[in-house]
Image (tube, coloured by chain):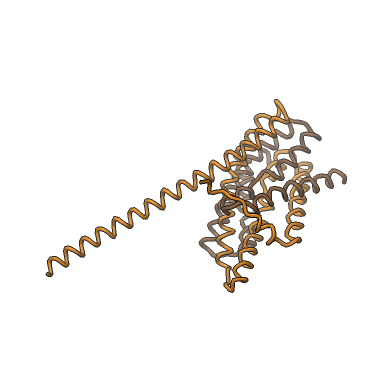
């Protein structure tokens, strides 16, 4: 329980810090870079190294590459749907999570990860 | 002159509950990743280190801020809000290339030195993200200039043809 509380607080602080940095930066496309900042990764990998060791964290880093590629695809899909289909941000960002999930697990499967 | 600047006015535009939502989402995403790693292993858990959970909140907030700003000016602002969120999404797609660099550098270096892995991976994210953003900006400028040149050449041809027609008639 304590572990999850530490995760929650650490994740909240790191994510908020990156988000606020993104808020004050202009232009908006540059600020958007912080939407893909390694905020959750920094918090989680730190705990992973402390609890399970470097090998375990390296494995997480390996599959994170598939997640990052899926995130790039997700960003493109969300951008296109907002510009061309004129949808609102909330439904688009939530619906496109299907794209992220499919791409992330698909890439991990192709890379030989046991999903 | 650098095109990147800081504007602290956007911090004043944010409502307190928006910061709470982001904090809670960030915390929840980190807890969820830890839970997934424990239940399904490091490989599946690692995927969720790049989960766009926080992006959903950020894009929605950007759209809401833009609509609020336009409402105050007496305009609808819905389209402007969508376009602002779209720009944020384009930036996130470029940032994801940086995230890929972060993951690759971390994967390759963490077993040699943990502190060095965190520092070099973070640097890799920053350098690759900014480079990708700058390259896209340059490419867009070049494409825009080419379009303008083509349009200007077409207009000049049209003008010359009109002049020839005028001389033929008179």
B33 displayed left or right of B161: right
Residue that sits furthest to the front in the current view: B1
- Position of residue A88 measured from the top left corner of the image (x, y, whole percent): 60, 64
Q: Quadrant of residue B44?
A: top right
Q: Residue at x 77, y 31 (%)?
A: A53
- From this view, report whether residue B109 is shown above or below residue A26: above
Q: Colour of chain A?
A: brown
Q: Residue at x 66, y 39 (%)?
A: A63
Foreground: A68 or B62? B62
Foreground: A114 or B55? B55
Residue that sits furthest to the right in the current view: A1
- From this view, report whether residue B33 is shown above or below residue A88: above
Q: Colour of chain B?
A: orange
Foreground: A110 or B17? B17
- Position of residue B5 measured from the top left corner of the image (x, y, whole percent): 58, 50
Q: Residue at x 60, y 42 (%)?
A: A107
Task: Say which quadrant the C terminus of chain A sits in.
Answer: top right
> How many marks are shown on the rendered structure?
0
A69 displayed left or right of B162: right
Residue that sits furthest to the top in the current view: B112
- Position of residue A26 measured from the top left corner of the image (x, y, whole percent): 59, 52
């Amino acid at each position: 329980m304590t572990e999850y509380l530490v995760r929650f607080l650490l994740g909240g602080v790191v994510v908020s810090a990156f988000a606020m940095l993104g808020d004050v930066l202009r232009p908006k496309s540059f600020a958007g870079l912080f939407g893909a900042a390694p905020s959750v990764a920094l918090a989680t990998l730190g705990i992973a190294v402390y609890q399970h060791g470097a090998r375990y964290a390296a494995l997480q880093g390996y599959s994170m590459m598939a997640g990052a590629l899926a995130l790039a695809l997700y960003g493109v899909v969300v951008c296109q749907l907002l510009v061309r289909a004129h949808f609102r941000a909330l439904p688009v960002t939530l619906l496109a999570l299907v794209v992220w999930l499919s791409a992330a697990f698909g890439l991990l499967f192709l890379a030989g990860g046991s999903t | 002159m650098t095109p990147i600047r800081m504007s602290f006015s956007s911090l004043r535009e944010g409502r307190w509950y928006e910061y709470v939502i982001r904090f809670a989402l960030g915390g929840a995403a980190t807890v969820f990743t830890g839970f997934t790693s424990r239940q399904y292993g490091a490989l599946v858990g690692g995927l969720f280190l790049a989960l766009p959970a926080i992006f959903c909140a950020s894009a929605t907030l950007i759209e809401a801020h833009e609509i609020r700003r336009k409402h105050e000016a007496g305009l609808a602002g819905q389209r402007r809000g969508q376009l602002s969120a779209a720009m944020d999404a384009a930036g996130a797609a470029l940032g994801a290339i940086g995230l890929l660099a972060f993951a690759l550098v971390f994967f390759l270096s963490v077993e040699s030195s943990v502190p060095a892995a965190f520092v070099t991976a973070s640097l890799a994210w920053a350098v690759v993200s900014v480079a990708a953003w700058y390259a896209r900006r340059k490419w867009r400028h070049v494409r825009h200039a080419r379009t303008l040149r083509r349009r200007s050449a077409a207009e000049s041809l049209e003008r010359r043809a009109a002049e020839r027609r005028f001389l033929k008639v008179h």
